[in-house]
Amino acid sequence: MAAILHEEYPVASDDYAGAGKVSSRIKELLKQMGFGPDVSRRAAIACYEAEINLIIHSDGGKVILEVSDEGVISLAFRDVGPGIPDLEKAMTPGFSTADEEARNLGFGAGMGLPNIKRVSDTFDIETSPDGTNLTLTFRGGI
Amino acid sequence: MKAKEILEALSAKPLALNCEENMEKEYGKAFASDLMSDVLAMVHEPETTVLITGLCNAQSIRTAEMMDITLIIFVRGKKPVDQSLDFAEDYGINIFSTDYTMYETCGILFGKGLEGLRGGDPA
């Protein structure tokens, strides 16, 4: 399975003004490539939640988009820390450590990771104080 | 309900009319929340679901964009900043503002036949 598209987008910590710009760009790209509305929307929802997580919780990171020649969309979110202290709790709907600023954006409801997992076809997450790696795939065909 | 009927029922002001075609479109459901993750989790038929919110910033419009929601109603006369309205234009999202509170807005539209999303359904 070879990558026919590989793009990387930096996401800065606390960049509340830019929240959603990367996800918007990725959704547009997927549409241009001919992905259907269901898979594009699922990828956009996951990407948006994960982008918001990078802004709210991480010390900065990046989003890596890959599309394979078999039509599989892969989204990877890599950050440089500080990691998720209790992953099990973070995966529990309603659990949140988000601050006031995140809540003012309409986020911090504790639904981010559960939402991401729900819309993704595969969901892998590894976390340590050095950073969190979240990798998702979506299948829907072009 | 058609978007133009919703506008009338709520004595709303159109803040952005970015898609004339969608003013004639039938919307069957509505979802009201200020929590965008709840919107992302709950809305399964975004093309015909109206988003009712008091969250008056770019993120409510971004959420609509990600979901392909085409009609947002801001309650209590709220208005997003112009910059947010600009990018709603890029995605053909229509935006209304009503002076009614969120509860009143929901009540009026529910009474006119706009259904809610089923809370018991798994997200």
Image: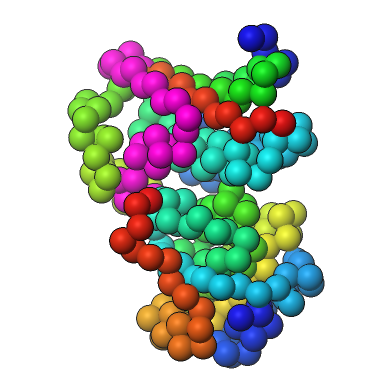
Residue B80 is left or right of residue B41, and the answer is: right
Q: Residue at x 59, y 48 (%)?
A: B66
Q: Is residue B39 magenta?
A: no
Locate residue B22, reporting x and y percent.
Answer: 73, 70
Q: Answer with left or right where residue A33 lies relative to residue B43.
A: right
Toward the viewer: A133 or A129? A133
Q: Is residue A127 visible?
A: yes
As drawn, is A39 to the left or to the right of A48? right
Image height of A10 relative to A2, above or below: below
Q: Position of residue B33 (x, y in %)?
A: 41, 65
Q: Residue at x 36, y 21 (%)?
A: A125
| Residue B60 position (above or below residue A85) | below
Instruction: Give the colour scheme shown.
Output: rainbow
For the record, the magenta segment spans: A103-131
- Of residues A91 and A128, the one nearer the viewer is A91
Image: A135 above or below B11? above
Residue A103's spot in the image, x, y percent?
A: 35, 52
Q: Is residue A110 magenta?
A: yes
Across the whole image, how many numbered discs are drawn on residues?
0
